[in-house]
Image (cartoon, helix red, strand yellow):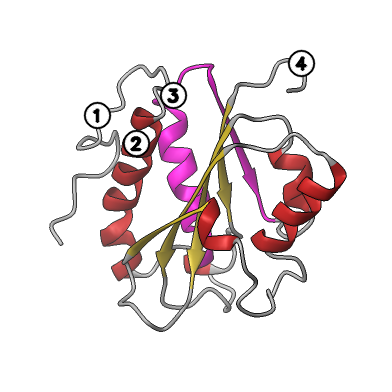
């Protein structure tokens, strides 16, 4: 771990000007007010090999991101662990996806999180330039943030108040 880093990383991924693609960034910002110093919170519009630098040296990492599979209704929260990425299922739009990044880190002997969780929300449209989340993603945001809180709680992360049912800005969604 690099000097000054917390053992746990919360990494919000996305792009603020691509509508629903920003859901990971928005969730990370909501959580920022509730987390103590033992969780490092980063935001990034990068992907692929950039993840090597961002994840290096942390014991645990929770990634928050948007996903468009077309297999779930928008607002569905999906959870993936390191084991889900042992095999490459198809090419990544980021040139190097999580499976390639994990293998490269292992080959290069890079200290990588032993606990890795990717929390993704199925979104409507992460490709067109616009600010703000779609209505379905906005409604599901409290569920997304709540699940992130549960994961951090399970990891024993110290927090000011990480009650999974509360959010400083949004009321829990009924889904």
Name the residue that disc number 3 marks.
35
Give the mark nearer the N terminus: 2 vs 1. Answer: 2
User: Is residue 140 one of those drawn in magenta?
Assistant: no
Separation of marks 3 and 4 at Cα, in angstroms: 19 Å
| Residue at (57% x, 79% y) in the render | 128
Q: From the viewer's perspective, is residue 132 above or below residue 61?
A: below
Q: Position of residue 57 (x, y in %)?
A: 72, 30
Q: 10 Å neighbourhood of mark 1: few (<14), some, or many (≥20)?
A: few
Name the residue that disc number 2 marks.
149
| Residue at (65% x, 72% y) in the render | 88
Foreground disc of the pair 3, 4: 4
Placement of the N terminus among the 4 image quadrants: top right
State which quadrant residue 96 falls in: bottom right
Residue lying furthest bottom: 70
Residues tagged 1 and 4 counted as in contact (Cβ below 8 A): no
Name the residue that disc number 4 marks.
3
Name the residue that disc number 1 marks.
163
Q: Position of residue 73 (x, y in %)?
A: 30, 77
Separation of marks 2 and 4 at Cα, in angstroms: 25 Å
């Amino acid at each position: 771990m690099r000097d000054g880093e917390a053992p746990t990383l919360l990494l919000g991924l996305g792009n603020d000007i691509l509508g629903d693609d920003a859901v990971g960034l928005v969730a990370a910002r909501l959580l920022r007010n509730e987390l103590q110093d033992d969780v490092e919170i980063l935001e990034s519009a990068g992907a692929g090999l950039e993840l090597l630098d961002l994840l290096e040296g942390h014991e645990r990492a929770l990634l928050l991101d948007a996903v468009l599979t077309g297999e779930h209704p928008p607002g569905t929260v999906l959870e993936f662990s390191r084991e889900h990425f042992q095999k490459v299922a198809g090419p990544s739009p980021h040139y190097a996806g999580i499976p390639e990044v994990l293998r490269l880190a292992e080959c290069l002997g890079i200290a990588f999180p032993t606990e890795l969780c990717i929390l993704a929300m199925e979104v409507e449209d992460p490709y067109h330039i616009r600010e703000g989340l779609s209505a379905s993603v906005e409604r599901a945001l409290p569920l997304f943030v709540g699940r992130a809180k549960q994961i951090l709680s399970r990891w024993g992360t110290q927090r000011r108040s990480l009650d999974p049912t509360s959010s400083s800005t949004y009321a829990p969604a009924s889904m």
